[in-house]
Amino acid sequence: MNIPLLNRLAQFGKPSPALTEASTRAQATVDAVCLALPEVLAVAVIAIESGQALASYAALPSLNPAKAALYNAEVVKQKRQAIKALGLNGEKIEDILITLREQLHLLRLSPDEQRLLYLAVSARDTNLAIARDVLKTYCQ
């Protein structure tokens, strides 16, 4: 039976092809980071404009990078505004490091500045230079 209203309603539950493709690429990035940095605590690919996590992984149940995605995207947006307010024309954010007592949180923007790769690692178990290199390698 072909009922136009029902056919249109059925389409609302389907993700757009662009979102599915972006999520697939994001999941591949998350998987690659986990392989390159086995001691990772959390990793996520975040759409900066919406603050939505396109893919994420957490080694600990208490650490949910998808839940913090909006806040990490907001950090980037606020830093962009600060750069503009300081008149630093031509400058771009490469990465942001947030140092906690026991963890390092790194945020790296994609080359098109539309996505953000978020990484959380143990400050004791991970070399910061290696973590930054992994982010740089897989942030696309």
Image (cartoon, rainbow, N blue to C red):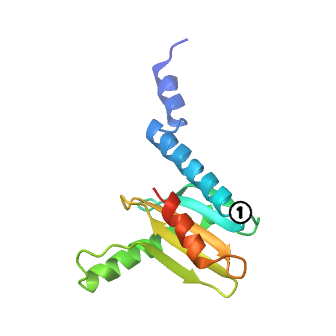
Figure quadrant of residue 132: bottom right
Q: Where is residue 70 in the image (x, y as percent from the top left)?
A: 52, 66
Q: Residue under circle 1? A: 38
Q: What element carries label 1?
A: loop
| Residue at horizontal 41 percent and vertical 61 percent from the top | 49
| Residue at horizontal 49 percent and vertical 41 percent from the top | 21
Q: Is residue 64 visible?
A: no
Q: Is residue 100 visible?
A: yes
Figure quadrant of residue 78: bottom left
Q: Tell me: residue 24, above or below residue 59.
A: above
For the C terminus, which image quadrant?
Answer: bottom left
| Residue at horizontal 27 percent and vertical 86 percent from the top | 86
| Residue at horizontal 66 percent and vertical 66 percent from the top | 42
Q: Give the camera-side residue of 64 and 27.
A: 27
Q: Position of residue 51 (x, y in %)?
A: 48, 62
Q: Give the camera-side residue of 126 and 17.
A: 126
